[in-house]
Image: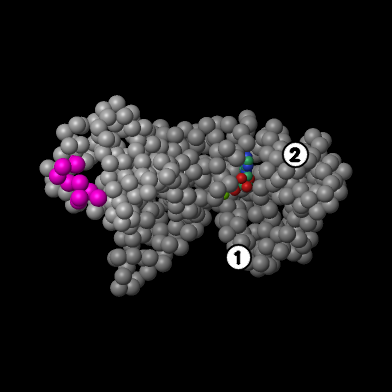
Amino acid sequence: METLELKNLWEEVKSGLIDELPENAHPWITPLEVTGYDKGVLTVVTGQMMGRDLLKRNYYNSIVNVIKNVTHNPDSDFVIIYDENAAKSLRKENEKLQKKVNAAIQKEQAMENLSYMQSASNLNLKYKFENFVVGKSNEFAYKVTKSVAENPAGKYNPLFIYGNSGLGKTHLMQAIGHYTIFKNPRLKVKYTKTEDYVNDFISNSRNSKDTIENMSKFNKKYTNIDIILIDDIQFIESKKKTMSQMQHTFDSLYNKGKQIVITSDRLPKDIPTLTSALCSRFEMGLMVELTPPDKDVRIGILKKLSADNGLEYTDEALNYIAEHYYNNVRELEGAFNRVSAFSDMTGSPLTIELARKILKCDETKKEIDLSKIANVVADYYNVSVDDLKGSARSQKISAARHMAVYLSRELCGNSFVSIAEFFNKKHTTIMFAHDKIQKEISCNSNLASDSREIKQALKVI
Ligand code: ADP
Ligand code: MG
């Protein structure tokens, strides 16, 4: 019989003995160590001579009955040996074994907890620190987020991560979540997109007979946690009620000493919908910017993607892609995915010829600037560039202007102030126009296809 099997059998017999025998016999039973089980005969060893004699004399029959009950073997028997040294060393061995078993159980529980927490907290498994390529352009943001993960609600609370779309804000934010859960599965982490938070609030605060109960559940969900990760706060609604709810969530977490992490595509003061109360709260901790990836980071990301995909490449090819996709990691990944899919299909390694053929960057990546975007957008909507810069507000001109502003920000990454100057508008007007399209584009397929066609005309995709 295997050690573990024997041990389990003995544990069962022992608990039967504790149930069956009177309490004054228990001190003789607990120190018994099992040594074997063969054809119904269970052998145990004890370091107590008196224990052996008492058990044999007074309880032999009861003990055999318990063994019969457990093993279902009518020929059961029981042998008890007195041997002080053997009992001691067996005890040590068993303790070691028990420790191992306990550690395995704990590990299993921790893994179960971990995967439960990861799914309950809404995290994407890809967005971990170990998958984040670090270089000059993002080193500070990386260090700060790592430090928050190591020491939540320490020096940097709240942490506000900002930067243009596609630079790794969501990735770093979620990395905090993964790291914390792994290090301490007891901590509760919640990741939420701002839009989901807002929608959740709206549906729970709607007047009904259950509003009070619903709102109490809502509050529990967002404040009964240790770390909250709120993504893309620029999408917060301007409604008073939503703002004050967000303020409530922020304050209750902050006052309990919980970590708050927020991302945004711009600074709090540039989010026109934000109340000054929320703005000042977000500015209270540390604000860290993610800037476009430097060349080393871009190459590092491409190498990592190639390794993950088992793709053979030449340095020249990676260099070519990195040279042409410099503004946005999401686009860099998109370019890689296109060449990698082709390379997979044809079974050819990633060479510069292949990259050129698929990405066609040479003709396309002539510097793209605001006036080029304005020209192409004006053409597409059949209006003039002067219309875009002027004050007419017909539906057609407004639609064109909104799209031009949106693409200027997305493709060139210029500040709202410089886009505003170019289009002759106030920078808050520009922010509204940009946000309107950014919000609508994911659910309006006409808008999405307009944007795609204009990008094709601009030769950026
Ligand atoms: P954001 O939230 O700023 O719009 P994301 O965090 O969604 O950007 O990043 C876009 C994509 O780029 C994701 O797939 C992310 O994993 C990847 N990415 C961004 N920065 C890095 C980096 N430094 N190393 C590896 N991947 C990165
Ligand atoms: Mg994001």
Q: Residue furthest bottom?
A: 209
Counting every numbered tag in the picture gives 2
Q: Going 52% across and 32% down the picture, which residue do you hit?
A: 143
42 left or right, relative to 419: left
User: Magenta residues?
Assistant: 55-64
Q: Quadrant of the N terminus?
A: top left
Q: Is residue 88 rendered magenta in the image?
A: no
Mark 1 Cα-neighbour bin, 10 Å: few <14, some 14–19, many ≥20: few
| Viewer-closest of 350 and 169 | 350
Earlier sequence position, callout 1 versus callout 2: 2
**Can the viewer see residue 282 in this picture?**
no
Q: Helix or strand or loop: what does disc 1 sit on?
A: loop
Q: Helix or strand or loop: what does disc 2 sit on?
A: helix
| Residue at mark 1: C-beta within 8 A of ligand 2 | no
> Where's residue 391, x and y in %?
65, 59
Measure the C-alpha gap from mark 1 to mark 2: 31 Å
> Where's residue 294, x and y in %?
68, 34
Residue 295 to residue 447: above or below: above
Q: Residue furthest front?
A: 75
Where does label 2 land, which residue? 322
> Where's residue 395, x and y in %?
65, 68
- Residue 449 location, quadrant: bottom right
Q: Going 36% across and 65% down the picture, which residue do you hit?
A: 205
Mark number displayed over residue 310: none
118 left or right, relative to 433: left
Where does label 1 land, which residue? 443
Q: Going 29% across and 26% down the picture, which residue do you hit?
A: 85
| Viewer-closest of 32 and 177 | 32
The three-letter amino acid code for the residue at tag 2 is Ala
| Viewer-closest of 196 and 429 | 196
**Can the viewer see residue 47 in this picture?**
yes
Q: Is residue 58 rendered magenta in the image?
A: yes
